[in-house]
Each structure stands twice: as structure tokens, then as C-alpha cells.
Amino acid sequence: MRVALFQVASPDDESVVDRIQRVGAAITGESQLRQADLLVLPELWHVGYFAFDHYASAAETLTGPTVTAAKDWAKALGLFVHLGSVVEVDEQGRLYNTAMVVDPDGAIRATYRKVHVFGYGSREQELLTPGDAVTVTPVAGLPTGITTCYDLRFPELFRSMADAGAEMLAICSGWPAARLAHWRLFTSVRAVEQQSWLVACNAVGTQQGVALAGHSRIVDPWGEVIVEAGTDEGFTVAELDPTLPRRVRAEFPALADRRWPAVPIRVES
């Protein structure tokens, strides 16, 4: 299974329309994607995660311009596209940070509304409605859990995906450079905890004065980093063995040995 990560820059002086066109030209012109099974993009790359004042104007439904472009890319290249996420608006006017996977036929295979919206140094909690469901979907035959950025700090969500059968974890992100060490730590630990492949695509560049970390990476179920990008915009591609999670779980059955929540909780005074 070949996976490609496209870490995108979202400069403040570039319109959403221009960015979709630029990113689309890069994707359809990238020769490495001709043999890929999955392409993953960053969180809210269409508007820029930190462009909070533009969330409302950039919001779209699941038939909007960013989603439609992703469908076209998937069909043109014959691969799955994890769009990253977009600001989604529902019929009641509520906004969500919504990730989605489009299949090679151009159909939306799954959506995930970010459960843990960020508050520290962010207006996401003010502007967006949290999601309320875990998403696991087959991607090129591999059961895949979909999460977004800040979710990495909440291990319960990832364990829920493993319990639902996930063998790969796909994460889109707009993670700042100031917390790069945490990005590397959490992406490695979540892969090991769930004994799953983890593919994580982060944004690059600067948005509203905030430097993004880049360093998109793919981590195997043992915690080995298979590939890690730098801080420039571009594609990072790697081959994954889709049978590895099951083999690791059979060899070292940590998930099967879990006794929680059977063990009682005692709080001593």
C-alpha cells in the first residue's frame, strides 16, 4: 500500500479559490501519485487553520468547492483522498471542522467532525461545534480511523478506533512549530498504543503569524518512523505493509491483554 502525504502551506495573502487551484495542479501533476493508494492533506488547508476571521466565509457543505475538487482528484488519479478537513456548515448554520475520505470513484466514503476542538491560543472552540462520533472506514482495504490534530492529545479516542477495528490511523493537522516535540511524541505513542499504522499530515508555512511545524510522518505499529518530511511544502511518499498490524498484534498481544475497565478504581483519602 502506497501512501502520500501532501503538507500544504496556506499563506494569508492567497485566496481559497487560488489555493484550491494551486493545490489541485500540484496533485494532478505529481508523478508519485500515479501509483499511490491514498493521499492525505492537512487540517483546514483550504482556509488556513489560524485564519479564524475567514471561517464563516470559507465554510462549505459537502458539495462545496474544496470537496468537489477532492472528488475530481480522486477520480483522475484512481486513489483514495483524505481531504484533510474543511470548515463545514450544516443546515442550521453550525460550523464544524470536518475531515473526509473520498474513494477512487469520487464518492465520499466517510466524514469525521473533529471531536476535540482546540481552545488554547485558538478560537476554534468559539467558532466551531464539536463532533460526537468516532469514524472508522476501509481505505484500500485497511480499516482506518480518522482524527484531526488536537485529538492526538486524547488517547481514549484512539483506543475507541482500535476497538472498532482500525488498523491504520489517519490524522490531518495544523500543528504549530512551537510544539513540534509533542507532535512527534503523540504520533509515535498513538501508533504503538493501538498497534496500528499511523499516517499524519501537517501544514507548513506561516498563518496569521503562527509557524506550522510540518514534519508529516508515517509511523509503523512498533513505533518506527518510516518517513518524516521537513518544513517545506511538498509530497512525502512511503510503502506500507497492510498486514503488519495484525502480525504485530499476534506477536505481541497487548491489546488482547487489556483488562480495563474490569479493574475497579480506588481513590484513597
Image: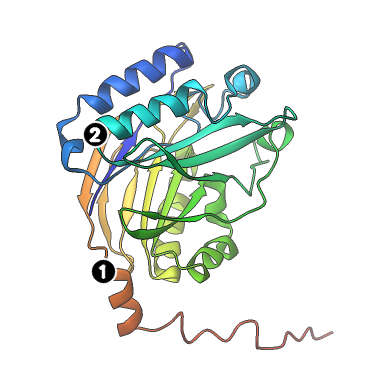
Q: Residue furthest right?
A: 269
For label 1, count other residues whose C-alpha is less than 10 Å away and answer few (under 14), some (14-19) or many (20+): few
The residue at 24%/51% (across/down) is 227
Type of amino acid at the residue the image marks with label 2: Leu
Whether residue 232 is visible, yes or no, is no
Q: Is residue 66 above or below residue 259?
A: above
Give coordinates of residue 232: x percent, y percent: 29, 30
Q: Which residue is mark 2?
A: 77
Mark 2 secondary-structure assignment: helix
Kindly indicate the quadrant of the structure image that contains residue 55: top right
The residue at 45%/13% (across/down) is 17
Image quadrant where one finds the C terminus: bottom right
Q: Is residue 215 above or below residue 59?
A: below
| 126 or 164: nearer the viewer | 164
Q: Which residue is mark 1?
A: 243
Give coordinates of residue 225: x percent, y percent: 28, 58
Mark 1 secondary-structure assignment: loop
For label 2, count other residues whose C-alpha is less than 10 Å away and answer few (under 14), some (14-19) or many (20+): many
Q: Is residue 41 left or right of residue 237?
A: right
Give coordinates of residue 216: x percent, y percent: 34, 44
Whether residue 152 is visible, yes or no, is yes
The residue at 64%/42% (across/down) is 118
Kindly indicate the quadrant of the structure image that contains residue 50: top right
| Number of numbered discs visible in the structure rendering | 2
